[in-house]
Image (cartoon, rainbow, N blue to C red):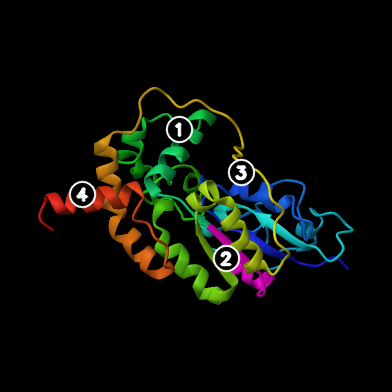
C-alpha cells in the first residue's frame, strides 16, 4: 500500500520553494507528485470532517517503492488551518520552511499578482491603503491569497503555529538565501533532517514558476522604511525563536539604521 505524504514544504511564498521542489524531485530517496503545489490542505472546498486522503495520495505514482513522498505548497505555512490539517493527516510528517526578507518577499509577491492581472494598485499603495481591502474579509477568503503582501511577512506567528502542532525536531527552518547562495550546505541540512542519503552534486537551481517583467516603478526607501517599521519587531522575535540570522535582511538593516539615527 502506498505510504502517506511525509514531507511538506510550507513556505514562504516567493521564498525559493520552486527551486526546493526541483532539488527534491531529483533525489532518488524521494517521490515527487506530478506538480509542485498540490493545494490539498488549503482547499476550502473540501469537507474537512471527512477530507478523503486517497485523493491526495492518488497524485503520486502508484509504485513509489520506499521513497518518501513530498508536497511543496508554500501557502500551507500561512493559511490558518493548514498545519493542523497536516498534523491530523500525518503527525509524523516533517516540515521545511524557507524564509525570505519580508520586504523582498512582498515586492516579489506584488509583481506576481500584478503580472497575473489580479493587482492594479501600485506597490506603494498596495502595501498601505490597499491593505484596507482585507478589512472585515474572512480569514479564508480568496482575497487573503492575493493581497497579503505584508500579512505573510509576520513570520513569528507562522513558526509558533508550526510548533503548536509539531515538535521542533520535525521542523526545519532555513533562510531562502541559504538555498540560493550556498545550496550544497543547505541540501546537506535537508538530507540530515529527512534522514536520506546526501544529495548528488548539482549546479544551483534558479527555478521560477513563470517569467514576468515588473513595471518600471520600483520600491523606494520610503516603502522599505514603512515595511521595516511595521514588521521590524516581528522579524526580531522570529529570529530569536528560530535562531536564524537575519542581520543581512533589508528590513533589519533599515530598522537598525532608522533606530540609530533616532538615537534608539
> Which element type, helix, strand or loop, lies under badge 3?
loop
Q: Nearer the viewer, mark 4 or mark 1?
A: 4
Q: Give the range drawn in magenta.
A: 84-97
Q: Earlier in the sequence, mark 2 or mark 1?
A: 2
Please, is residue 111 above or below residue 167 in the view? Answer: above
Q: Nearer the viewer, mark 2 or mark 3?
A: 3
Please, is residue 61 above or below residue 143 in the view? Answer: below
> Which element type, helix, strand or loop, lies under badge 1?
loop
Quarter of the picture holding the N terminus: bottom right
Quadrant of the image occupied by residue 216: top left
* 47 horizontally vs 109: left or right: right
> Which element type, helix, strand or loop, lies under badge 2?
helix
Residue in the image at 35% along x and 59% along y: 235
Cα gap from disc 4 to disc 1, whole angstroms: 32 Å
Q: Mark 4 points at which residue?
A: 257
Residue 105: x percent and y percent? Answer: 44, 44
Q: Earlier in the sequence, mark 4 or mark 3?
A: 3
Q: Earlier in the sequence, mark 2 or mark 3?
A: 2
Amino acid at each position: 500500500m502506498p505510504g502517506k505524504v511525509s514531507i511538506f514544504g510550507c513556505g514562504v511564498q516567493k521564498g525559493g520553494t520552486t527551486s526546493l521542489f526541483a532539488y527534491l524531485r531529483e533525489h532518488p530517496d524521494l517521490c515527487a507528485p506530478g506538480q509542485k503545489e498540490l493545494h490539498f490542505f488549503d482547499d476550502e472546498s473540501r469537507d474537512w470532517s471527512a477530507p478523503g486522503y486517497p485523493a491526495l495520495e492518488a497524485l503520486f505514482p502508484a509504485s513509489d517503492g520506499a521513497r518518501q513522498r513530498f508536497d511543496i505548497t508554500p501557502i500551507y505555512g500561512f493559511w490558518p488551518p493548514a498545519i493542523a490539517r497536516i498534523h491530523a493527516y500525518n503527525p509524523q510528517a516533517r516540515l521545511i520552511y524557507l524564509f525570505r526578507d519580508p520586504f523582498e518577499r512582498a515586492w516579489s509577491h506584488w509583481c506576481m499578482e500584478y503580472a497575473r492581472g489580479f493587482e492594479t494598485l501600485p506597490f506603494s499603495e498596495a502595501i498601505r491603503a490597499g491593505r484596507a481591502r482585507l478589512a472585515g474579509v474572512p480569514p479564508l477568503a480568496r482575497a487573503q491569497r492575493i493581497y497579503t503582501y505584508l500579512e505573510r511577512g509576520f513570520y513569528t506567528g507562522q513558526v509558533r503555529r508550526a510548533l503548536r502542532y509539531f515538535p521542533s525536531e520535525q521542523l526545519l527552518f532555513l533562510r531562502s538565501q541559504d538555498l540560493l547562495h550556498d545550496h550544497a550546505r543547505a541540501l546537506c541540512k535537508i538530507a540530515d533532517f529527512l534522514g536520506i542519503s546526501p544529495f548528488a552534486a548539482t549546479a544551483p537551481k534558479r527555478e521560477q514558476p513563470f517569467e514576468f517583467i515588473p513595471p518600471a516603478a520600483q520600491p523606494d526607501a520610503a516603502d522599505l522604511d514603512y515595511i521595516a517599521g511595521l514588521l521590524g519587531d516581528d522579524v526580531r522575535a522570529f529570529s530569536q525563536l528560530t535562531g536564524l540570522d537575519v542581520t543581512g535582511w533589508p528590513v533589519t538593516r533599515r530598522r537598525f539604521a532608522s533606530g540609530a539615527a533616532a538615537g534608539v
